[in-house]
Amino acid sequence: MKTRCTFQSSNITLSYLQWNRGKEPLLLLHGMADLNLVWSSLGEFLAEKYHIVAPDLRGHGESSKPKTGYCCQDIINDLEALMDELGWENAHILGHSWGGKIAALWANNHPQRFRSLILVDPFYVGKLPSWLKITFPLLYRVLPFLQGMKPYPSYEAAEAAAKELKQYQGWSDLQQKVFQASIEKKADGTWRSKFPVAARDGIFDDVMTVASFTKQVDVPTLLIKLDAGLNRSQWQFKPYYQYLSHLEVREISGNHWAFLTNPEIFNQTIQNYLTSVRPKTI
């Protein structure tokens, strides 16, 4: 069984899910506009061996939603403080999409925190030209994970729209619970995502112009390539091969949210990799 816990740092409260039956530390980082509940299936699957913590990153889910402070380093600082609170010197760290970019940057700067790094179809880890900022309004309108930020007149209307999105293909019990936890009724009577505009804008301002890898990273790393994911072209994979000394790539079927749409194969792939990583003593 998972439990919901909170951690209070100097300026923020993080809500996190914890499976505390196993011993090896495993930290799970969700993507932009998601929340920690997306890891429910993986958490239950791995719980016997691993001590698993899945935070709602700042601006997401039940954690604090400040008006500023959404650069990658702010998130890493939160996670460093959380690991210190847990008494973890290092951990297996898995990041999806934007969470993958954060994990990659973290490994680049503080590799001692990592027993292993697992990147699940990460958002582009390189640095993009600042002029691309003019495209952000278009991206805000079309990216599937931001569709919940639209106002909907009723919960039923919001749910009907969600069922058309890639992350909810199949509409399993878990997908329904994730969606229900991600949305709330606002003061004006409309239903919208809990993910605020300030977090969206702050993350985009930073994430597009920060390069995760700037030097060789000597951390055992698994890159999950999805046959219907974001990373499909050779130029997208170049930074991983260039900077990761111990890289393994595994391709599985599924879209960007395979842990929701194809959890059985996804969970087994993660378990197989973690089992293969040589233990690192804390």
Image (cartoon, rainbow, N blue to C red):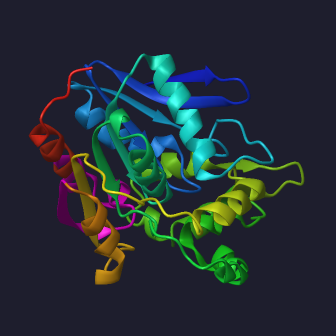
Residue 4 at x, y percent in the picture: 52, 24
> Any magenta on residue 255?
yes
Residue 22 at x, y percent in the picture: 25, 20
One can see residue 221 in this view: yes
One can see residue 1 in this view: no
Looking at the rendered image, the quarter that the C terminus falls into is: top left
For the point 66% across and 77% down, the residue is 130
Q: Quadrant of residue 96?
A: bottom left
Q: Quadrant of residue 116?
A: top left
For the point 23% across and 47% down, the residue is 267
Measured along the vertical axis of the image, is residue 25 above or below residue 135?
above
* Residue ranking furthest to the front: 215
Residue 169 at x, y percent in the picture: 41, 67
Looking at the rendered image, the quarter that the N terminus falls into is: top left
Segment tinted magenta in the rendering: 246-268
Measured along the vertical axis of the image, is residue 212 above or below residue 118?
below
Query: Which sits in the foreground, 42 or 270?
Result: 270
> Any magenta on residue 178?
no
Measured along the vertical axis of the image, is residue 189 above or below residue 133?
above
